[in-house]
Amino acid sequence: MNIWLVNHYAISPQQAGGTRHYTLARELVQRGHQVTIIASSFDHTTRREAHLHDGSPSRLEAIDGVRFMWLRTPPYTGNSARRLWNTVVFSRNVLKLKPMVLGGKPDVIVGSSPHLFAAWAAERQARRHEVPFVFEVRDLWPQSLIDLGSFSESHPFVRMLERIERSLYRQSSRIITLLPGAGEHISQKGGDIERIVWIPNGVDLRLLPPPSPPQEDGVLTLMYAGAHGLANNLDVILDAAKIILDMQNSPQVQFRLVGDGPDKGRLIRKAKDLKLKNLIFEPPVAKDRIYDLMREADVFLLTLQNSPLFRWGVSPNKLFDYMAMARPIIFSVDTPFDPVKEARAGVSVPAGDPHALAEAVVSIANMTSEERWEMGLRGRAYVEKNHNVPVLANRFEQVLIDAIKMRVSRTKE
């Protein structure tokens, strides 16, 4: 198959962030398929130009056999109007792409959210070339904008996005969702429940060092590695760090927040105001180097806002990276789909509750190193069974094959 995969925010392994499509594409390339990932050259995490430093409008690059078509888009900071313009320009540039620069006519085109303009452009390209379109739903837009409090349901922008969302569901040969419970929402918006396939995020365990227990030095290191944005609710970590700092006979702990994002500057100022001697901020680390850093953690932290958005589940890359490193996880997310609890790989607490988070830290600090190691190993076993990239690639490949077969059968009718 010649596969075009449109993901505005896709990155190479030399960048910091999730590499879902690179790892899936590399697996498909090894099976004989040609995969081109179409992405923006502007790095969303660092807010810097990452690939087109010579001023060119685009560039085709091969990394481990995976082809990346980097498209230039305008810079932005924060969630401003310039960010919206960035998404519009990217989608417009996707529409301009010709098969001759992408290795020939595609057999199938995948359009990935979160924002819907890129997926819409992918669907238009699929229609132009008369090939099946597969819609991958990583975040439920515009529902995310509503549930995170940015927009009301009646906002004209939300209504426009909902029209696009419904159209994409109708036009899709198959719909991939990363969220285990999203089928209900998708079907309510016009998606055919029979076409929905759950393919969560995962980890290529071949890229990780063998699991090993952390070095004991008398200080419990709690690490968060990921985006510093609104949805991540890192304030709860800062507040929990303050609670622990003010405790009598508090455990010796060190919070390490690794990454970048629009909230990082504000969080640094807040930590300074709170005089958090037990918390430090660190820069983002490229995906191909992050696991060496993560080995320094004793416990990992995953926090999200207390929002109805997560009633359909969550699938953050960092969660499965955490599990793969065989460390306990404190999971501060309100969702009926809790992999940490299912795997018995850590402690789950209510979202947005710093006191509960602090209590969980103390609880894990009071465990023996053997108990923490056993907890981490349960998480590792869970990932090996459910979130290993070759297993997920099998599902992804089959979805694309089924989409092509469906298109062929319709053509013959």
Image (cartoon, grey):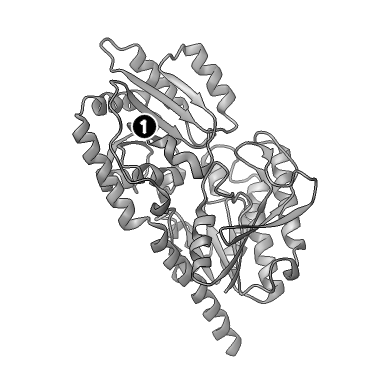
The vertical placement of 232 against 167, above or below, is above
Which of the 4 image quarters holds residue 224? top left
The vertical placement of 29 against 382, above or below, is below
Q: In which quarter of the image is the C terminus?
A: bottom right
- Residue 137 rendering spot, x and y as whole percentages: 52, 56
**Badge 1 amino acid:** Ala
Residue at 38% over, 57% down: 388
| Outermost bottom residue | 412
Q: Which one is nearer the viewer's eye here, 26 or 19? A: 26
Residue at 49% over, 17% down: 271
Residue 215 visible in this rendered orientation of the protein: yes
- Residue 154 rendering spot, x and y as whole percentages: 62, 46
Q: In this view, does 233 lie to the left or right of 158?
A: left
Residue at the spot of label 1: 297
- Residue 404 rendering spot, x and y as whole percentages: 55, 77
Label 1's element?
loop
